[in-house]
Image (cartoon, rainbow, N blue to C red):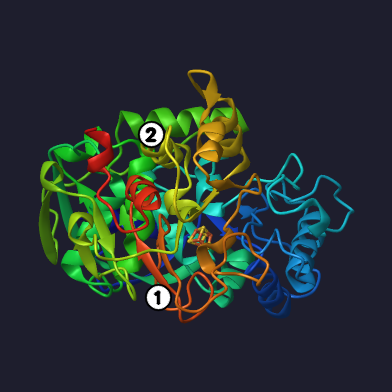
């Protein structure tokens, strides 16, 4: 069996499964957020009753992150609905925007978009917060009401996005009927070269198979190249499995996985026991691709879908209007480090926005010094508009007052985010070009798509 099949067989209590089997699997964690949480709660209450209790209060994790820093009253109210539910159910893992369990969330526009407006429990973008808060464990099954839930496959778990109806069912029963996906294997060899990032790996892969090339399939990343990839790198790659239509992504378990998971579960007091899945000798794949990391170059996915692959060095003709670094895919500390490495001591020439994925990342950037400056100061001095209000922000457009949202037609944005279908970051006539934080940085310095290696070698 492949890693995904082994994991699902275990979750179904069966000795073996094969692709195409329909099986009931037990959920280890159900995650929802402010966009889908109210709908999920509505389904749960409708189907299980107004006074029903969730199947396991330790396993329901609620993370508001999407439409938070906006004056839109309906968006603010969604956070209140989540708070009411968490209080009613006694949920220990609700990462509220505010500290008062009886309060109401209201974004204060008079304070502006840059200075932080959240309390001490706020966790930021769900997919970055889940591992950071100790909710991702090898060998487990994670369902989330968000398509990029697949990011947690970096931790050797089965993680996939589900709709509100399925999530309402999981909330009440702790299980779900799913079809075992076929597995595609991506064998990574070699090591990434300077200026090339994990984002380039996944943009390369999606360029190979197309934005629907893995529809309802597991994407298994393995091979000797995995050892050189950090957990952040693996998260970036797993995050975008859904951009090829993938049901899930999965990585093997190794000492890096263990180090990260052990540290985060013990720091946050979450469940520490887990049982990874190891590869079998006789795995059957429907597709295999060898990716030589040494040979990859900075890559761009052009408007209008993530499969429109080109090399950054061949895109110099494309003039840009703005640059954006942020999201679960591209807003991690390591992403901002590479962004800052290129920008240090220089000035951007187009509007450039930086949105850390979580409050912890804000703290990292504001406390890590390179010489006499913090990384945050280096980025601000380069002209980047950095916000402390960690969250999804303009990654998915959002209400019209969202930080970094593209509100004018025709603008071209190079972005470290993960999705570039028309209208994704705001105006439906705008265009988004996906790239690594290093490529976004180099492009922000020139105003056109630029290979970051031009800056690293000088
Ligand atoms: S940062 Fe973007 S991709 Fe990630 S959860 Fe938020 S909206 Fe979705």
In which quadrant of the rendered image does the C terminus lie? top left
Please name the residue that numbered disc 2 is placed on.
341
Q: Which mark is residue 421?
A: 1
Q: Relative to 148, is 18 on the left or the right?
A: left
Q: Relative to 206, is 381 on the left or the right?
A: right
* Res 304 quadrant in image: bottom left
For image coordinates 80% across by 74% down, the residue present is 50
Q: Within 8 Å: ligand 1 and the Cβ of disc 1?
A: no
N-terminal-most mark, 1 or 2? 2
Q: Relative to 80, is 381 on the left or the right?
A: left
For image coordinates 15% across by 44% down, the residue present is 293
Q: Position of residue 194 (x, y in %)?
A: 22, 36
Q: Position of residue 447 (x, y in %)?
A: 37, 57
Work out whether residue 196 or residue 446 is closer to the camera in this orientation and state it: 446
* Res 24 quadrant in image: bottom left
| Up-down relation of residue 202 to residue 360 (above or below) | below
Asked which secondary structure carries label 1, the reply is loop
Q: Which mark is residue 126?
A: none
């Amino acid at each position: 069996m492949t890693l995904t099949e082994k994991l699902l067989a275990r979750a179904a209590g069966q000795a073996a499964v094969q692709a195409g089997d329909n099986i009931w699997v037990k959920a280890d964690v159900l995650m929802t957020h402010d966009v889908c949480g109210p709908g999920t709660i509505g389904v749960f209450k409708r189907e299980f009753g107004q006074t029903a209790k969730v199947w396991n209060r330790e396993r329901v994790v609620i993370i508001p992150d999407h439409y938070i820093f906006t004056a839109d009253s309906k968006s603010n109210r969604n956070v209140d609905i989540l708070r009411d539910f968490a209080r009613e159910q006694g949920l220990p893992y609700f990462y509220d925007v505010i500290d008062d369990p009886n309060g109401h969330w209201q974004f204060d526009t008079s304070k502006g978009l840059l200075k932080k407006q959240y309390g001490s429990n706020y966790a930021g973008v769900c997919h970055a917060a889940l591992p950071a808060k100790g909710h991702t464990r090898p060998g487990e099954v994670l369902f989330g009401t968000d398509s990029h839930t697949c990011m947690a496959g970096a931790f050797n778990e089965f993680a996939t996005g589900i709709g509100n109806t399925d999530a309402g069912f999981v909330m009440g029963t702790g299980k779900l009927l799913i079809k075992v996906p076929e597995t595609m294997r991506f064998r990574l060899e070699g090591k990434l070269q300077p200026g090339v990032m994990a984002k380039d790996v996944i943009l390369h892969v999606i360029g190979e198979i197309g934005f629907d090339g893995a529809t309802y399939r597991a994407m298994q990343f393995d091979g000797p190249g995995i050892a050189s990839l950090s957990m952040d790198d693996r998260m970036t790659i797993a995050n975008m499995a859904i951009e090829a239509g993938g049901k899930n992504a999965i990585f093997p378990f190794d000492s890096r996985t263990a180090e990260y998971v052990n540290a985060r579960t013990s720091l946050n007091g979450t469940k520490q026991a887990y049982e990874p899945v190891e590869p079998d000798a006789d795995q059957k794949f429907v597709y295999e691709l060898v990716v030589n990391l040494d040979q990859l170059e900075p890559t761009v996915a052009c408007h209008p879908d993530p499969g429109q692959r080109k090399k950054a060095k061949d895109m110099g003709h494309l003039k840009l209007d703005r640059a954006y670094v942020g999201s679960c895919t591209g807003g991690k500390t390591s992403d901002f480090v590479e962004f800052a490495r290129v920008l240090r001591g220089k000035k951007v020439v187009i509007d450039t926005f930086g949105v850390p994925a979580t409050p912890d990342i804000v703290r990292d950037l504001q406390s890590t010094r390179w010489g006499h400056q913090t990384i945050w100061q280096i980025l601000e001095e380069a002209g980047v508009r950095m916000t402390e209000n960690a969250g999804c922000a303009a990654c998915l457009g959002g209400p019209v007052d969202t930080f970094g949202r593209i509100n004018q037609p025709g603008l071209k944005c190079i972005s470290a985010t993960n999705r570039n279908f028309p209208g994704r970051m705001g105006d439906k006539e705008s265009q988004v070009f996906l790239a690594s934080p290093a490529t976004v940085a180099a492009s922000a310095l020139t105003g056109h798509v630029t290979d970051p290696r031009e800056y690293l070698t000088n």
